[in-house]
Amino acid sequence: MNRLPVTLFALCLAACGARSDDAPRMLRAADTHPSGYPTVAAVEHMSEILEEETDGRVRIRVYPGRQLGEERDTIEQTVFGAVDITRVNAAALTSIIPETRVLQLPFIFRSREHRDAVLSGPIGDEILASMEPFGLIGLAYYDSGARSIYTKDQPVRAPADLKGLRIRVPGSFVAISMIEALGGNATPMEFGQVYEAIRSGAVDGAENNWPSFFDTRHYEIAKYYNLTEHSFAPEILVMSKLRWNQYDKEDQMAIRSAAEQSEAHMAALWSAREEEAQAAARANGNIIVSDVDKEAFLAAVQPVYAQYASDPRLKDLIARIEAVGPRS
Ligand code: GTR
């Protein structure tokens, strides 16, 4: 008897983890945002699709509001398989996955359309695939709008206005380098600590998108939202590779497809939340600074590009992202 096909089949079973029998029916997903936030709702929606596509075999339970820890912890737990799925911003992955650093470079994306064109194409797939050697399966990108700098007591129109200001950033060297290049003092800290840091004056401001500014109630204590729009870094949904390997090909495809389908659901929720956040800030009397000198910001962050482009792989990635249309 020719044993080769059997051996190959056995090898594939081991390598692909081609049995879903031992795999959990309920995946545990972490999110720093509270229940009702678009990213949380998107993963809940993904669960519904997944349940349908697997005839009820696999579902997801989302633990919102940092129940499973801050993003740095949940990424680590996902690598080790204690958490199955984590939704984080690209910023949180930059310390372990080199390719994600490029996504957070200030002004790398010229517009949302440019970001979408990059992420929905081969470069987006390549960055998701680059996570696998680090124990993570990149499943999907979610919109995260544009991040702008907000400040407690004074407007920021040009980099010179940041001089001496302590600005909270996520724990990412790209974000730290950016604020330093702009002349501010970067203060990295976890998301959950930012409200108290602004309130107490430990920092003079932070930077984030409209929905986060609103949902965290930072808008109640930081008067100025300065439209620097320096980052379009997306939210990213990642899964534990250890857990992934427990599913057969069919279930892996169902997980991937459900994640992809949840992107559109999230996009609709996101636009609505952005509008709601802006309306709330206006009603609250926040000052929205729109006459920002973006050219001056762009010029000031050039050293950050030089720093990351010293890695030839990232240099090539930056060039390919810049070459993607549309040119708006
Ligand atoms: C939010 C993002 C979170 C987290 C947070 C932060 O926009 O959705 O995942 O990264 O920013 O600044 O820590």
Image: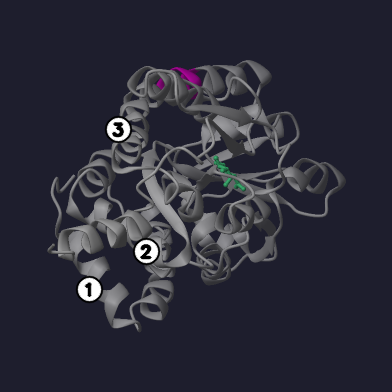
Q: Position of residue 30 (x, y in %)?
A: 61, 39
Which one is in front in this view, the residue at disc 2 or the one at disc 3?
Answer: 3
Label 1: state its secondary structure: helix
From the image, tell me which residue sits under label 1: 316
From the image, tell me which residue sits under label 2: 102
Q: Position of residue 303 (x, y in %)?
A: 42, 77
| Ligand 1 closer than 8 Å to label 2 CB | no
Residue 108 visible here: no
**Left or right relative to 182: residue 106:** left
- Residue located 45% across and 47% down the image: 246
Q: Which residues are magenta?
A: 271-275
Residue 214: image quadrant is top right
Which one is in front in this view, the residue at disc 3 or the one at disc 1?
Answer: 3
Quadrant (top left/top right/bottom left/bottom right) for the N terminus: bottom left
From the image, tell me which residue sits under label 3: 257
Q: CA distance from mark 3 to mark 1?
A: 29 Å
Ligand 1 - quadrant of the structure image: top right
How many numbered tags mark residues here? 3
